[in-house]
Image (cartoon, grey):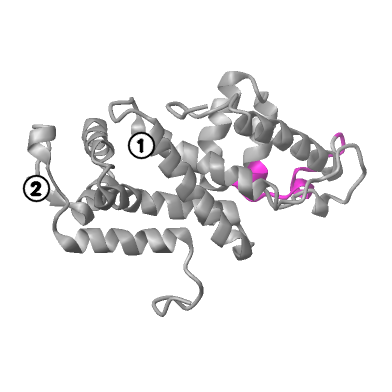
């Protein structure tokens, strides 16, 4: 066990260590005005770059310029660690959302997220449009594929209590853009997307949706059927949010 961690470090923990080592070296700097003249900053190190992109107002062209430069430099191990580290806050949010209440899957799940991110970074051209979105989407989809096999499925066509109608489902923080894409592509009808958001996004139980015409058990079955359709569309590559690779 690593003495710096109370438990065995995951791939994301190790990525954070590698990022810190690269940032502390002082070797990995970008001259932002040379890349994008309207960026109001000079030379920035890795931590400053991460803080810039984590802010609420960085322009899209600034984000694109930073990610393009990091992707161009990925042949250097320090810049590769820097790219993963800059994305680390988003990757941790994805991991927490996909793991839900089951921390036991985090070691393997974190590894899948890093693998998916690096796979996309090596595959995509640095000048690819919406590079950051595409990198994070590939990581999300890779993690979703792993997390999905650890989530119990609700048996279709059976009568179950409404309380059993919400098995864990690893949508995490990526649900909203996925639902928008599903509605645009016709993968889900509006009612199915609204049901998924009500239960998974807002935390409402099927029993709360119960009416005289549609009891909670029926809502639970509809939820499971819609989720299976959505899961298959995401994992098969038929569906991606705007800018995400399919």
Residue 78 is one of the magenta-drawn residues: no
**Vertically, is 181 above or below 77?**
above
* Mark count: 2
| Along the viewing direction, whichever of 35 and 25 lies nearer the viewer | 25
Query: Residue 104 appears at what percent x and percent y?
Result: 62, 65
**Vertically, is 204 above or below 108?**
above
Helix, strand or loop under label 2 = strand
Residue named by callout 2: 43
Query: Residue 167 appears at what percent x and percent y?
Result: 74, 51
Image disc number at residue 226: none
Q: Quadrant of residue 181?
A: top right
Q: Residue at x 35, y 37 (%)?
A: 132
Q: Is residue 227 left or right of residue 125?
A: right
Image disc number at residue 132: 1
Query: Residue 31 appears at what percent x and percent y?
Result: 9, 42
Q: Which residues are magenta?
A: 198-213
Q: Is residue 149 left or right of residue 105?
A: right
| Along the viewing direction, whichever of 12 and 92 lies nearer the viewer | 12
Q: Residue at x 86, y 43 (%)?
A: 155
Q: Residue at x 42, y 36 (%)?
A: 120
Q: Is residue 24 left or right of residue 233?
A: left
Is residue 187 among what the camera can see?
Answer: yes
Q: Quadrant of residue 59?
A: top left
The disc, 2 or 1, on the residue closer to the chain's N-terminal end is 2
Query: Could you tell me how far apart the alpha carbons at marks 2 and 1 are, in whole angstroms?
Result: 21 Å
Label 2: how many Cα within 10 Å (few below 14, some 14–19, many 20+):
few
Label 1: how many Cα within 10 Å (few below 14, some 14–19, many 20+):
some
Helix, strand or loop under label 1 = helix
Q: Is residue 89 left or right of residue 26?
A: right
Circle 2/circle 1 CB separation < 8 Å: no
Query: Residue 83 appears at what percent x and percent y?
Result: 31, 47
């Amino acid at each position: 066990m690593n003495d710096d961690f109370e438990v065995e470090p995951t791939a994301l923990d190790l990525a954070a260590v590698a990022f810190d080592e690269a940032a502390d070296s002082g070797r990995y700097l970008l001259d932002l005005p040379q890349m994008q003249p309207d960026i109001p900053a000079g030379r920035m190190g890795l931590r400053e770059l991460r803080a810039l992109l984590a802010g609420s107002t960085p322009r899209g062209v600034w984000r694109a310029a930073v990610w393009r430069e990091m992707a161009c430099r990925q042949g250097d191990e320090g810049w590769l660690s820097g790219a993963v580290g800059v994305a680390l806050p988003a990757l941790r949010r994805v991991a927490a959302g996909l793991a839900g209440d089951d921390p036991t899957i985090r070691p393997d799940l974190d590894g899948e997220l890093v693998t998916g991110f690096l796979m996309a970074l090596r595959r995509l051209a640095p000048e690819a449009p919406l590079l950051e979105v595409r990198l994070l989407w590939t990581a999300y989809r890779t993690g979703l594929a792993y997390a999905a096999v650890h989530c119990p499925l609700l048996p279709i066509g059976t009568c179950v209590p409404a309380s059993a109608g919400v098995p864990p489902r690893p949508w995490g923080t990526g649900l909203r853009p996925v639902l928008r894409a599903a509605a645009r592509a016709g993968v889900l009808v509006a009612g199915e997307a609204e049901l998924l958001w009500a239960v998974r996004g807002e935390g409402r139980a099927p029993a709360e949706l119960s009416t005289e015409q549609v009891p909670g058990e029926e809502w639970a079955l509809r939820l499971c059927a819609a989720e299976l359709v959505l899961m298959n569309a995401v994992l098969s590559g038929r569906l991606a949010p705007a800018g995400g690779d399919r």
